[in-house]
Amino acid sequence: MTRSRLLQQLLPDLIKQRPYLCDFFAALAITVPQQEVTLSDFLAGQPAGHLAEFALDPPTLIQQCLDFIAQMEKFQGRDQTTIRRLTVKGGHDKSGRPELDLELHAGEVICVVGPTGSGKSCLLADIECLAQCDTPSGRQVLLDGTVPEDAFRLSGEQQLVAQLSQHMNFVMDLSVREFIGMHAESRLISDVGQRVEQIFSTALSLAGEPFTLDTPVTALSGGQSRALMIADVACLSASPIVLIDEIENAGVDRRQALELLVKKEKMVMMATHDPLLALSGDRRIVIRNGGIVAIIETSEKERDGLRQLAVLDRRLARLRDQVRRGECIVFDMCL
Ligand SMILES: Nc1ncnc2c1ncn2[C@@H]1O[C@H](COP(=O)(O)OP(=O)(O)O)[C@@H](O)[C@H]1O
Ligand SMILES: [Mg+2]
């Protein structure tokens, strides 16, 4: 919402939609009235003497209030659904040869393929930090065709990009409940308890082995922590860009994970060696020697093949379970 439209809103409506405004006013010892007054009139009507105690005057108060709302909206992700297009202006490969440009649209899933060491994680990292010709690849990332604001680049809260990286290390000694709760609170979710339950049950269904809300995060296995992070991104994050680095080795139900993450209007970029995941995307980027050398559109034939692949994959998953349970495998014709 524009600043002038915000100022014309009635205060009780604004507070209903943005309860955090009460904290803003409380910090300045301003009592919030019940009656219908616009934000503009309310702020302009504050006694100068009272504001002076906080080294403020009415224009500065208005400015600060609007800045606060803008900050909170970015933080909560209200402002973020508007990114429709991400452009990577090609840099160069490890030998300095120029690479292809890349464009990604909202609602699209694109995979990144290439041998180990070819630069897949690097491409994801360039997008995560919204590179501006200042990383080893020399790539430049544009959002909706323009250079992103510094606020996006420098923010520690990764408002735009949710990254699921290859290596997940928890450094804090928290229980699963505390960990999810902390995330939910930091993203200003009102029903934290309910959200913790939702994320936990999603994570459980993704993970191969069960765990509890009281399990310390440092005691989770690789697959369990991956499942927890995937559930966290899927249920909590408002970021329009989701980056996933090789979830196939994580011991999670990867097809379910992908379904969860590929929510409408999100851009998903996923580095993978897994044909099932690679063919689930709309396109795939081929990386060689650090540079983008081709972008392949998933063909109809490949999509047909994907259905057969899914059947094979389910069979393999069943076999894996049998092996895990210590059973003997009986090979028959329908394998
Ligand atoms: N365009 C590039 N220019 C220079 N170095 C690069 C480039 N792309 C990747 N690298 C380097 O190559 C190494 C392997 O890249 P990485 O992204 O980890 O590969 P992958 O994820 O495909 O296994 C890293 O050290 C990375 O910094
Ligand atoms: Mg990698």
Image: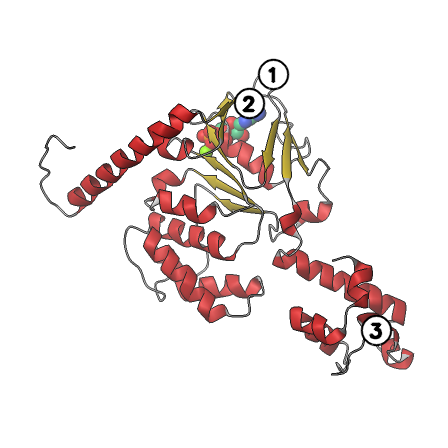
Where is residue 190 shown, x and y percent of the image? Answer: 55, 70
Q: Position of residue 272 (x, y in %)?
A: 42, 33
Residue 164 % position (x, y): 47, 45
Q: Position of residue 115 (x, y in %)?
A: 42, 24
At label 2, the amino acid type is Gly
x 35%, y 48%: residue: 222
Q: Residue at (30%, 32%) from the top-left corner?
A: 309
The quadrant in which the C terminus is found is top left
Cα separation, mark 3 vs mark 2, equals 54 Å
Identify the residue position indicated by label 2 in the image.
291
What kind of colouring is applied to the model shown?
secondary structure
For the residues marked 1 and 3, what is the alpha-carbon distance in whole angstroms? 57 Å
What is the three-letter code of the residue carrying label 1? Arg
Q: Nearer the viewer, mark 1 or mark 3?
A: 3
Residue position marked by numbered label 3 in the rendering: 43
Q: Foreground: 33 or 203?
A: 33
Classify mark 2: residues with Cα within 10 Å, few (<14), some (14-19) or many (20+): many
Looking at the rendered structure, the secondary structure element under dot 3 is: helix
Q: In the rendered structure, which amino acid carries the disc numbered 3?
A: Leu
Taking the image as shown, residue 45 lies to the left or right of residue 256, namely: right
Q: Quadrant of the N terminus?
A: bottom right
Q: Secondary structure at mark 2?
A: strand
Q: Which residue is mark 1?
A: 97
Evaluate whether residue 175 shows in this view: no
Earlier along the polypeptide chain: callout 3 or callout 2? 3
Q: CA distance from mark 2 to mark 1?
A: 8 Å
